[in-house]
């Protein structure tokens, strides 16, 4: 699958912290999101993994200014091994669960959760994510609810942005950020708890930060200021 709005949205929306040094893009495809992360985090090393051929991703990385910090592996993420866990994991995964598959095998692998069921994606994140790390994913709204159910008790939702294509249309995508459910998340800005060693506040149980993003104004090829602001750096620099 080539560059699409979903990948651009996730690559721009995922929170990149100054301390994040190791990042993983699951289902990297052409390497779009991996390259966006490398652009946004000058000190980080980014790995992209995909079950399909990663030759195009490697070509794209080699043609970019960040080739020295981006690497790709052709491997099912279920079998992917790493000596150190990742501070940030992102994924624009195959998402169709019950719909009919496409005769094109490549398109089916990219869009249907055949080779990467939601449970396998959850387990891979839990295995590869550092204790204080974050996981960001984009899914259609219906599949997002399925994924939340699969992650219950294992990954805790801390941030969500529902995406509308135009103001009059219902949300079509959900951008979601998770932490491990067995580790408290960073406290919210308005937290009044004493975050010392003996702090008893369970920040992972706090209500997630929820917002909405509208991509287009409804006029032909006219983006909203919010969408332009989110994706501006990528389009200007890449």
Image (cartoon, helix red, strand yellow):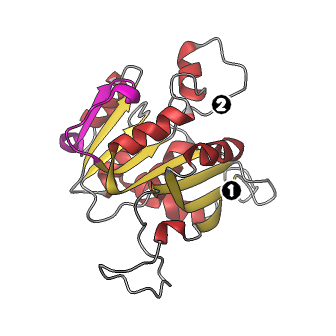
Q: Which mark is residue 160?
A: none
Q: Which mark is residue 216?
A: 1
**32 sits left or right of 206 in the view:** left
Please identify the quarter of the rendering in which residue 133 is found: bottom left
Q: Which mark is residue 96?
A: 2
Q: Which residues are magenta?
A: 66-85
Is residue 217 found inside the magenta-colored segment of the image?
no
**Can you see residue 40?**
yes
Instruction: Between label 2 and label 1, give the one nearer the viewer.
Output: 2
Q: Secondary structure at mark 2?
A: loop
Please identify the quarter of the rendering in which residue 193 is found: bottom left
Number of numbered discs overlaid on the protein picture? 2
The spot of residue 20 in percent (x, y) is 28, 58
Crowding around mark 1 (Cα neighbors within 10 Å: few <14, some 14 to 19, many 20+) is some
- Residue in the picture at 33% in, 64% down: 17
The spot of residue 18 in percent (x, y) is 28, 65
Check contact, mark 2 vs mark 1: CB within 8 A.
Answer: no
**67 sits left or right of 55 in the view:** left
- Residue in the picture at 66% in, 41% down: 143
**Can you see residue 215?**
no
């Amino acid at each position: 699958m080539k560059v699409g709005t979903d990948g651009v949205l996730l690559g721009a929306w995922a929170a990149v912290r100054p301390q994040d040094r190791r990042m993983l893009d699951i289902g990297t495809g052409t390497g779009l999101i991996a390259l966006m992360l490398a652009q946004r985090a000058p000190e980080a090393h980014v790995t992209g993994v995909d079950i399909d051929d990663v030759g195009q991703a490697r070509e794209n990385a080699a043609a970019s200014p960040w080739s020295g910090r981006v690497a790709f592996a052709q491997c099912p993420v279920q079998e992917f091994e790493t000596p150190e866990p990742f501070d940030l994991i992102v994924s624009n995964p195959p998402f169709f669960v019950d719909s009919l598959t496409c005769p094109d095998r490549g398109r089916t692998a990219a869009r249907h959760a055949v080779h990467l069921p939601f449970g396998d994606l959850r387990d891979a994140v839990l295995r590869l994510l550092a204790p204080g790390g974050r996981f960001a994913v984009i899914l259609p709204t219906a599949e997002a609810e399925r994924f939340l159910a699969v992650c219950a008790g294992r990954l805790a939702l801390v941030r969500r942005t529902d995406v509308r294509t135009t103001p009059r249309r219902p949300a079509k995508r959900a951008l979601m950020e998770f932490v491990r459910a067995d580790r408290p998340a960073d406290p919210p800005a308005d937290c009044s708890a004493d975050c010392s060693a003996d702090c008893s506040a369970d920040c992972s149980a706090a209500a997630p930060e929820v917002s909405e993003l509208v991509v287009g104004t409804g006029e032909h090829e006219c983006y909203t200021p919010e969408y332009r602001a989110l994706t501006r750096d990528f389009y200007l620099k890449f």
